[in-house]
């Protein structure tokens, strides 16, 4: 094994790079595989508790090269000042200079962001930032975002702000975000002041309330044609008439809904109405509908007669000449499993097996 060609060893480890158990197993084999596996084993680091911070600190103490291997960091910020100091000590003693993707999770106790986030985090040259935070003031979010002028991917769909007010934005650096995920109209109205809309390549609307949908249109208005993907989760709170969005200019459209949710039918119907009422030429090349596994084996609301009407509407809409170049794929979740397979970003765009009953409808055998 020690004489294995470097190219072959690299290829073996690269194939297994997403299988953490296999990567850990390779750490105990001869050095030709172990050295390459070591790079992958610390490429993504999860520090989800105070104990994990201490364990990682000890690893860095024994192997000073580990911090340079970390490319992606997921961390739950400590809740106590004591453990925050320990995290500061770790990052000051063993900086992570190559981190490009950061996920932060916790509830901020103070208004000053610098009292919550270690200063080392604020100096990273990040390309991707995902936040799962409960903030007391919207201004804290702006302070954090302006620390990362190189951001390309921003996910604030899990950010919850307890108190907001108009005019709270202190206009700073404009971020050229390419991939943006959001779920709150309050965040949308304010974050739009910090984003360059014309640079968006991909937008995810993570479960907006129906009365707030019209505010999302500003993210889709992209006259330069840069926007390529729109991923919309099923809208919530159907106590108001649904607002249709103009989306026919986006090449890849995805609707994701919970299969056992009572409102799944209305969510699919809203999506169909957006397609049917769209104005202008159709540039949509692929539509994906993901009905996520519900954990329930029987009693799906998709079996109801009203849902048959919705699917008929989808059929009548997409079989019109204006959608002749559009391919539809549908994933259905049964219990806790997916059929035909777990959808991912590559699979959503590349695979297609045409159905004999409807040339625009594709399934995986």
Image: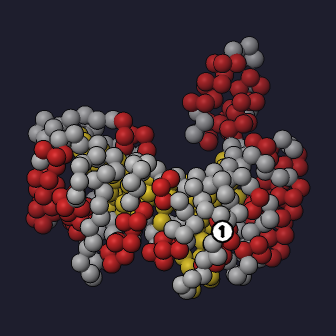
Taking 327 as reference, is 2 above or below it?
Answer: above
Is residue 136 depicted above or below 6 in this figure?
below
Judge whether residue 340 can be spotted in this image.
yes
Residue 194, image x, y percentages: 57, 66
How dense is the environment of label 1, judged by Cα within 10 Å: few (below 14), some, or many (20 and up)?
some
Quarter-of-image position of residue 15? top right
Residue at image location 32% in from the left, 61% down from the top: 257
Q: Quadrant of the C terminus?
A: top left
Left or right position of 65 against 135: right
Question: Tag count in the figure?
Answer: 1
Q: Is residue 317 above or below residue 23?
A: below
In the drawing, does residue 177 fall left or right of residue 272?
right
Please state if 216 lies on the left or on the right of 240 as rendered.
right
Report if residue 336 is visible in the image: no
- Residue 349 picture quarter: top left
Element type at marker 1? loop
Relative side of 269 to 124, left or right: left
Viewer-side residue, 365 vs 277: 277
- Residue 63: image location, x then y, percent: 86, 43
Q: Residue at x 77, y 25 (%)?
A: 31
Q: Which residue is mark 1?
A: 172
**Residue shown at the point (34%, 51%) measured from the top left:** 250
Q: Quadrant of the N terminus?
A: top right
Q: Which quadrant of the view contains residue 270?
A: bottom left
Residue 209 lies, in percent from the top left, at 36, 75
Chosen colour scheme: secondary structure
Q: Residue furthest front?
A: 223
The front one of 250 and 93 is 250
Which residue is at 87% across, 58% downward?
Answer: 92
């Amino acid at each position: 094994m020690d004489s294995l060609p470097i190219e072959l060893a690299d290829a073996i480890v690269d194939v297994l790079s997403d299988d953490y158990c296999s990567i850990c197993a390779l750490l105990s084999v001869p050095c030709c595989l172990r050295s390459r596996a070591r790079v992958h084993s610390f490429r993504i680091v999860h520090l989800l508790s105070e104990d994990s911070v201490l364990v990682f600190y000890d690893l860095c103490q024994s192997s000073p090269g580990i911090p340079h291997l970390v490319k992606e960091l997921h961390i739950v910020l400590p809740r106590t000042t004591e453990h925050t100091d320990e995290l500061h000590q770790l990052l000051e003693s063993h900086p992570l200079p190559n981190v490009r993707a950061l996920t932060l999770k916790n509830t901020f106790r103070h208004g000053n962001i610098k009292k919550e986030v270690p200063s080392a985090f604020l100096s990273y040259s990040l390309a991707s930032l995902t936040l799962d935070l409960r903030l007391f003031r919207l201004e804290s979010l702006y302070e954090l975002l302006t620390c990362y002028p190189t951001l390309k991917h921003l996910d604030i769909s899990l950010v919850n702000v307890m108190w907001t007010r108009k005019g709270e934005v202190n206009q700073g650096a404009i971020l050229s975000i390419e991939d943006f995920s959001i779920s709150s109209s309050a965040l949308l109205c304010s974050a739009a002041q910090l984003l360059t809309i014309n640079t968006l390549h991909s937008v995810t609307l993570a479960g907006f309330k129906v009365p707030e949908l019209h505010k999302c249109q500003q993210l889709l208005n992209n006259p330069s044609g840069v926007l390529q993907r729109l991923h919309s989760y099923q809208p919530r709170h159907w106590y108001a008439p649904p607002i249709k969005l103009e989306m026919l200019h986006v090449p890849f459209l995805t609707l994701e809904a919970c299969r056992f949710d009572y409102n799944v039918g209305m969510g699919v119907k809203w999506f169909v109405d957006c397609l049917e009422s769209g104005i202008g030429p159709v540039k949509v090349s692929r539509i994906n509908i993901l009905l996520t596994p519900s954990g329930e084996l029987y009693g799906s609301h998709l079996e109801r007669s009203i849902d048959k009407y919705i699917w008929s509407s989808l059929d009548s809409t997409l079989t019109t000449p204006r959608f002749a170049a559009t391919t539809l794929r549908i994933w259905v979740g049964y219990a806790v499993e997916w059929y035909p397979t777990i959808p991912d970003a590559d699979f959503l765009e590349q695979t297609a097996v045409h159905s004999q009953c409807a040339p625009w409808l594709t399934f995986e055998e």
